Image (cartoon, rainbow, N blue to C red):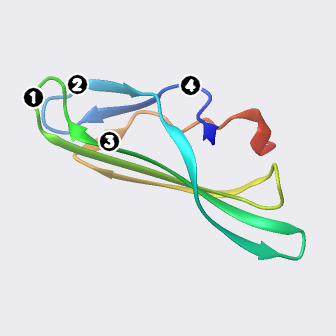
């Protein structure tokens, strides 16, 4: 399991409340390649805003290949907007 270096901050689109999310990236799949496995990690938040109860969904996907190297990531948001980009742990090699 990997973690984001700091809480991921998003803002509710309904009321403007800022949420600081402590998200863990869990390995959801791996694919064997020439230099070892390519690992896919994902973190999810699917809950209501603590202020207004509007639905908020956050999904962060990250791909590691070769080991220790973050090759790509994606963020999907519903009901919220990103305050800053996610910051990943040092062991991704970034």
In-image side of 6 versus 18 (left or right):
right
Residues marked 2 and 4 touching at CB (< 8 Å)? no
Which disc is residue 23 wearing? Answer: none
Tell me the distance, in whole angstroms, between the alpha carbons under discs 1 and 2: 8 Å
On the image, numbered disc 1 is attached to which residue?
52
Callout count: 4
On the image, numbered disc 3 is attached to which residue?
81
* Mark found first going from the N terminus, 3 or 4: 4
Which disc is residue 6 wearing? Answer: 4
| Mark 2 or 4, closer to the camera | 4
Tell me the distance, in whole angstroms, between the alpha carbons under discs 2 and 4: 18 Å
* Mark found first going from the N terminus, 1 or 2: 2
Q: Quadrant of the N terminus?
A: top right
Q: Position of residue 8 (x, y in %)?
A: 46, 32
Residues marked 2 and 3 touching at CB (< 8 Å)? no
Tell me the distance, in whole angstroms, between the alpha carbons under discs 2 and 3: 11 Å
In-image side of 46 versus 54 (left or right):
right
On the image, numbered disc 2 is attached to which residue?
17
Label 1: how many residues lie within 10 Å, few (<14), some (14-19) or many (20+)?
Answer: few
Is 8 drawn above or below residue 79 in the view shown?
above
State the residue at coordinates (69%, 61%). 39
State the residue at coordinates (56%, 25%). 6
Label 3: how many residues lie within 10 Å, few (<14), some (14-19) or many (20+)?
Answer: some
Camera-side residue: 31 or 60? Answer: 31
Tell me the distance, in whole angstroms, between the alpha carbons under discs 1 and 3: 15 Å
Is 55 drawn above or below residue 40 in the view shown?
above
Is 89 drawn above or below residue 42 in the view shown?
above
Residues marked 3 and 4 touching at CB (< 8 Å)? no
* Mark found first going from the N terminus, 2 or 4: 4
State the residue at coordinates (9%, 28%). 52
């Amino acid at each position: 399991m990997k973690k984001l270096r700091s809480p991921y901050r998003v803002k509710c689109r309904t009321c403007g409340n800022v949420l600081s999310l402590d998200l863990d990236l869990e390995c959801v799949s791996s694919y064997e390649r020439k230099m070892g496995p390519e690992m896919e990690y994902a973190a999810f938040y699917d809950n209501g805003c603590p202020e207004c109860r509007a639905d908020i969904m956050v999904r962060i996907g990250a791909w590691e290949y070769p080991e220790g190297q973050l090759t790509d990531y994606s963020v999907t948001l519903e009901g919220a907007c990103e305050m800053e980009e996610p910051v990943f742990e040092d062991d991704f090699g970034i």
